Image (cartoon, helix red, strand yellow):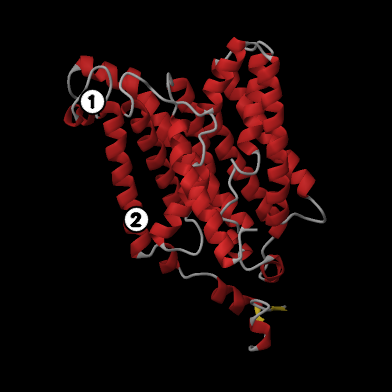
Amino acid sequence: MTGPLSSRTTRTAPRLPARIAFRLARPPVSGVLRPRLVVVGVCLALAGFLVFCLGISVGEVPIGLTEVMRSLVGAGDPGTGLIVHELRLPRAMTGLLVGIAFGVSGALFQTMTLNPLASPDMIGITQGAGTAVVAGVVLGRDAGLSTQSLGLFGALTTALLVYVLAWKRGTTGYRIVLVGIGVSWVCTSLTDYLMAYGGQFEAQASLGWLVGNLNGRDWNAVEPLAIALAVLVPVALLLGRWMRTLQLGDDVAKGLGTPVQAVRLATLLTGVGLIAFGTAAAGPVAFVALAAPQVAQRLARTAWPPPVAAGLTGALMVLSADLLAREVIPDTELPVGVVTGVLGAPVLLWLLVRANRVGSGG
């Protein structure tokens, strides 16, 4: 079997065997684990750990960084350990895991669709989760764990709807983005209607979750998300080899032996699973899934958003935003989604301007 590397190369070069073409299209192992990417990953991890400890140290009872680190390893004063492990560590862990989930999920969506503007909060996944949660609140369901379950159900259902509506003898990244934008507006309209239909108490409770919030998180929010990441992040890394061939186009990818539709469906399910569990834990934290992969890609200087670096960038963004949300206004804890929204909006505008200049973005 033969297949062109691209429509451009067919005019100047003879067709190559698929095995040779695949080796040319696939970056070498050193390109995946090259020094710059390793250095970027290590720096992001160290910065994230520092902000993680800073987030635990601030509060009504300030704790020094040294005492925080001692408490994390089981040493130090018992009273300090109680504050760290029972009151502040669950919130910090939730922010860390949510950032990783959103960053990796955004990298998967942007690589699958070949569109830097494609992220779960742009194609309706997080909006579907929000609609399900608001419906549950307005109908009188309890918050707590039922909110997590409703968020997970809403995200998965919306993703299935987008995939089915985008199917036409297969799916393409372009159709998924267009259908997702339409579905996101439908979900947003339904959410607005439900909040107007419900009472003032229900609307306030819904709004507190819809903006993305880490306030009051406990270990019940951490455990399901940690299990989901332990399963889905390795799957995302395993899909990386196949996803690189999708960047050459569906026809070339098929010629190289890639099961295009199966890989696209597996990528969609993995990304949706990550964003669903992350949204269920902290609400739809805005712009993290959009901005984190783009920042990681430019730091690592890769042709696509690297999932690990994107996850670490997302964690750093959420933890930093949560720290700012607690410190920017004295005696007031803003929802973390407010800060990420303010910081992420310029990133979205920059991506739109850049896509317009290079004539891409669709």
> In the image shown, does 4 or 328 lie closer to the viewer?
328
Quadrant into which the C terminus falls: bottom right
Residue drawn at (54%, 23%) of the image = 209
In the image shown, does 174 or 275 lie closer to the viewer? 174
Q: Position of residue 225 (x, y in %)?
A: 50, 31
Image: 308 above or below 186: below
| Mark nearer the N terminus (2 vs 1) | 2
Q: Residues within 10 Å of mark 1 (few under 14, many from 20)?
A: many
Q: For marks 2 and 1, give the one nearer the viewer.
A: 2
Quarter of the picture holding the N terminus: bottom right
Pick the residue in front: 111 or 18. 111
Rendered image: mark on residue 40: 2
- Residue at x 36% of width, y 20% of height: 332
Amino acid, disc 1: Ser
- Across and down, in percent, residue 199 comes to 64, 11
Percent coordinates x, y for residue 98 in the rendering: 47, 35
Number of the label disc, if any, that sits on residue 243: none
Residue 212 seen in the figure: yes
How far apart are the two marked residues, 2 and 1, measured between alpha carbons? 28 Å
Q: SS of the residue at dot 2?
A: helix
Name the residue that disc number 1 marks.
Answer: 71
Q: Residue at x 66, y 39 (%)?
A: 124
Element carrying mark 1: helix
Amino acid type, label 2? Val
User: Residue 136 placed where, x, y %?
Assistant: 66, 18
